[in-house]
């Protein structure tokens, strides 16, 4: 979009928040870059230039606006809707892969050379993987500076910088303030004192956002010990590269309040990325709803409660295991099966609030489970153990960077995997916005009540008009049933 100057200018002049994250406005006279919705008086048209990413702005010598904080705007929805190498690279960079494994590690995961990835990202985003990772490190550093009392040296290494000097230089260059000045400015704002060891932040999103199905689904399917709904917040444990964490996510009118407790602050970038992915916060609900509203049978559902998101997962392997446990059983039974698995194989954690007790077991921890101890039909035991084996040996990767169609083809070859299981994993673990569940009982009931075709083949043909947003159509169709997944818990 950033190449369409006229459209960008209109968005800036109208301060349209829907375009935050789609592009960034750099002001030639002040050398500052902003998000489109910046509250200051818009600059003259001749002084504006537009970039596709904050990293491209920083690489061109612009610093972040202190008013609108463009480095904290929602991510581009393109990376959710696409499955090409650039989109997969952006999702991996968001997960901190460049900081942990370098550009060669990023390229190896994508199956390209480092030079090819560099060239593709430069062509589309105006910045290479190192510059994009540097911009993300700067944002992580700012969060740690403003929300914790960590010494600056600890902040530097936790944010992924290789030295304190590089950290200081980057913060000054990006924010036009020294790290100590950022902390002083944050301390002057009237905020309640932070709980030691807890990082509190706001997760932005594009309006509208309907929290009912999003948090209702997560709460209704929560695995005891791993997840819970408490005091208006969804809480869960997180398994992270350097340790573990506990997160509490609370819906607010204009943001998601996020409280993170981490055993190692180096996991902050990944924890934030996982939370945003879980809640589908980088979606463009206006584009989704406009297309679905074009179907006269879907329009009343969209108009009644617009802005529904697809509830995802913080870990693809975890969700795949839970999907198998949930085959052909009720939501309550699926939770019971998962809770037994967690108690038997999950690592114990300490929760100051007392509700969470375990991390969900990794495939490696489940690899040695005895199928005879599972209270499941024999065929389901075979399905689960085969899946766990493929996840543990790395032959079946399930991550935000996974190729959607190739993974579907691999999943369908596993014993006990049918179209429903494959598509629900594609929707919630892989993040494919076009995943569709025509055989789902709730979808078939909704189709019959709305006058849509109720057979899977006919419904799939009708749903072609909803592409590439069929996963969002599923969320609206599920609301026809009065099920707990559609309601915020009391």
Image (cartoon, helix red, strand yellow):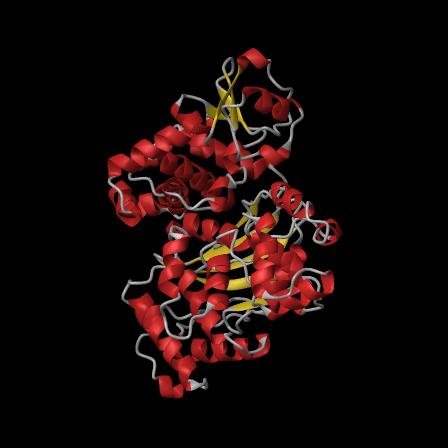
Percent position of residue 158, x then y: 37, 46
User: 35 above or below 252?
Assistant: above
Q: Nearer the viewer, residue 248 or 263?
A: 248
Q: Is residue 19 left or right of residue 119?
A: right
The residue positioned 43% from the left and 60% from the top of the image is: 315
Q: Nearer the viewer, residue 229 or 263?
A: 229
Whether residue 207 can be seen here: no
- Which of the image's four quarters has the C terminus? bottom right
Percent position of residue 363, x then y: 35, 69
The quarter holding residue 169 reads top left
Q: Is residue 295 left or right of residue 94?
A: right
Percent position of residue 259, x then y: 54, 54
The residue positioned 75% from the left and 52% from the top of the image is: 300
The quarter holding residue 486 reads bottom right
Percent position of residue 474, x then y: 60, 58
Whether residue 410 can be seen here: yes
User: 342 above or below 15?
Assistant: below
The residue positioned 48% from the left and 42% from the top of the image is: 143
Picture mark count: 0
User: 109 above or below 131?
Assistant: below
The residue positioned 63% from the left and 44% from the top of the image is: 291
């Amino acid at each position: 979009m950033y190449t369409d100057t006229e459209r960008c200018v209109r968005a800036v002049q109208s301060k349209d928040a829907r375009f935050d994250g789609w592009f960034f406005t750099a002001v030639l006279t002040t050398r500052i870059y902003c998000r489109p919705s910046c509250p200051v008086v818009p600059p003259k048209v001749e002084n504006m230039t537009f970039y596709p990413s904050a990293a491209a702005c920083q690489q061109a010598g612009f610093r972040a606006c202190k008013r609108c904080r463009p480095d904290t705007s929602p991510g581009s929805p393109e990376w959710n809707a696409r499955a090409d190498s650039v989109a997969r690279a952006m999702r991996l960079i968001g997960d901190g892969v460049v900081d942990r494994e370098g550009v060669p590690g990023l390229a190896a995961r994508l199956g390209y050379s480092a030079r090819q990835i560099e060239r593709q990202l430069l062509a589309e985003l105006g910045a290479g993987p190192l510059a994009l990772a540097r911009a993300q490190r700067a944002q992580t550093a700012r969060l740690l500076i403003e929300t914790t009392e960590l010494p600056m040296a600890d902040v530097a290494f936790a944010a992924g910088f290789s030295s304190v000097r590089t950290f200081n230089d980057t913060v000054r260059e990006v924010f036009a303030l020294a790290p100590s000045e950022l902390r002083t400015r944050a301390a002057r704002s009237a905020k309640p004192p932070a709980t030691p060891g807890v990082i509190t932040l706001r997760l932005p999103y594009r309006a509208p956002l309907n929290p009912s199905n999003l948090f209702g689904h997560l709460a209704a399917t929560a695995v005891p010990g791993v997840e819970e709904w408490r005091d208006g917040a969804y809480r869960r444990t997180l398994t992270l590269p350097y340790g573990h964490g506990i997160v509490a996510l609370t819906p607010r009118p204009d943001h998601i309040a996020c409280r993170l407790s981490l055993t190692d602050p180096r996991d902050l970038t990944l924890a934030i990325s996982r939370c945003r992915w879980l809640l589908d916060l980088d979606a463009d609900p206006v584009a989704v709803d406009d297309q679905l509203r074009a179907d006269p049978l879907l329009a009343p559902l969209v108009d009644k409660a617009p802005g529904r998101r697809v509830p995802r997962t913080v870990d693809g392997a975890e969700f795949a295991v839970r999907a198998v446990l949930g085959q052909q059983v009720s939501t309550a039974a699926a939770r019971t099966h998962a809770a037994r698995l967690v108690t038997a194989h999950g690592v114990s954690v300490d929760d100051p609030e007392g509700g969470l007790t375990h991390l969900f077991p990794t495939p490696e921890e489940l690899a040695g489970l005895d199928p005879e101890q599972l209270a499941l039909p024999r065929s389901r035991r075979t399905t689960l153990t085969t899946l766990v084996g493929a996840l543990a040996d790395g032959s079946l990767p399930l991550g935000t960077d996974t190729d959607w169609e190739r993974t579907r083809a691999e999943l369908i070859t596993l014993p006990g995997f049918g179209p429903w299981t494959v598509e629900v994993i594609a929707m919630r673990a892989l993040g494919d916005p076009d995943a569709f569940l025509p055989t789902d009982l709730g979808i078939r009931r909704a189709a019959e009540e709305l006058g849509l075709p109720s057979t899977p083949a006919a419904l799939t043909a009708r749903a072609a008009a909803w592409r590439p947003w069929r996963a969002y159509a599923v969320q609206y169709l599920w609301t026809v049933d009065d099920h707990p997944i559609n309601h915020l818990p009391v």
